[in-house]
Image: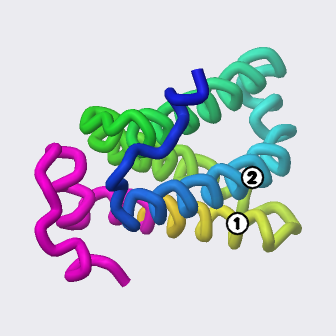
Amino acid sequence: MSQWFDQQAGTPHDVRRFERFWFLAMFLSAMVAIEMYDHTVMIIGPYLALLSNAAFFVASLLLVIYASRRRSNLARLLTIPFLILILFYDLAHLGAMVGSESLYLLVGTLCRLGFIVVAIHALFTPSSRAWFAGRPLASVGDYED
């Protein structure tokens, strides 16, 4: 079972960067979800709010595991619609975020979006694309930072 989560040999630096930024975004998402939970409960009820938050985090965790540990190109591509879904959610709740007295909610949301964009970008660098395609990386040093 632990082999399922092990990092594969030859994983490029950009895929590891994706993991770091994705987990940072998940942490900020948890903070935003906690802060917005009362608002979400008011709109869709307590059970649906809990279910939707849990589904979001499970989907996010599955995407990072399948993309970075299982080398799934489909998971890599699904990160883009996932970002769009989060963007629509944030735009729909922008009034509640701006109307709240907590500035850190808005800053946390913007940072979360930034972290997700940086993470997704790391999956589409030349070294990451070659890794997902199963091609050998002839000059990995050209893409590392």
Dot label at residue 108: 1
Q: Residue at x 60, y 32 (%)?
A: 56
Q: At which x and y percent is residue 68?
A: 42, 45
Image quadrant holding the N terminus, namely: top right
142 in the magenta segment: yes
Q: Amino acid at mark 1?
A: Gly
Q: Amino acid at mark 2?
A: Val
Q: At which x and y percent is residue 13?
A: 39, 67
Q: Residue at x 39, y 41 (%)?
A: 67
Give the residue pinned by disc 2.
32
128 in the magenta segment: yes
Taking the image as drawn, is residue 94 in sight?
A: no
Of 62 and 54, nearer the camera is 62
- Tell me if 110 is positioned left or right of 106 in this view: left
Q: CA distance from mark 2 to mark 1?
A: 7 Å
Where residue 38 sits, quadrant-wise, is: top right
Q: Is residue 78 above or below residue 115?
A: above
Taking the image as drawn, is residue 46 in sight?
A: yes
Where residue 58 sits, quadrant-wise, is: top right
Q: Earlier in the sequence, mark 2 or mark 1?
A: 2
Q: At which x and y percent is residue 83?
A: 43, 49
Say whether marks 2 and 1 touch (CB < 8 Å): yes
- Tell me if 46 is positioned left or right of 140 in this view: right
Q: Which residues are magenta?
A: 118-145
> In the structure shown, which secondary structural element does the residue marked by tag 2 occupy?
helix
Work out which residue is located at the far top of the displayed protein and give it. 47
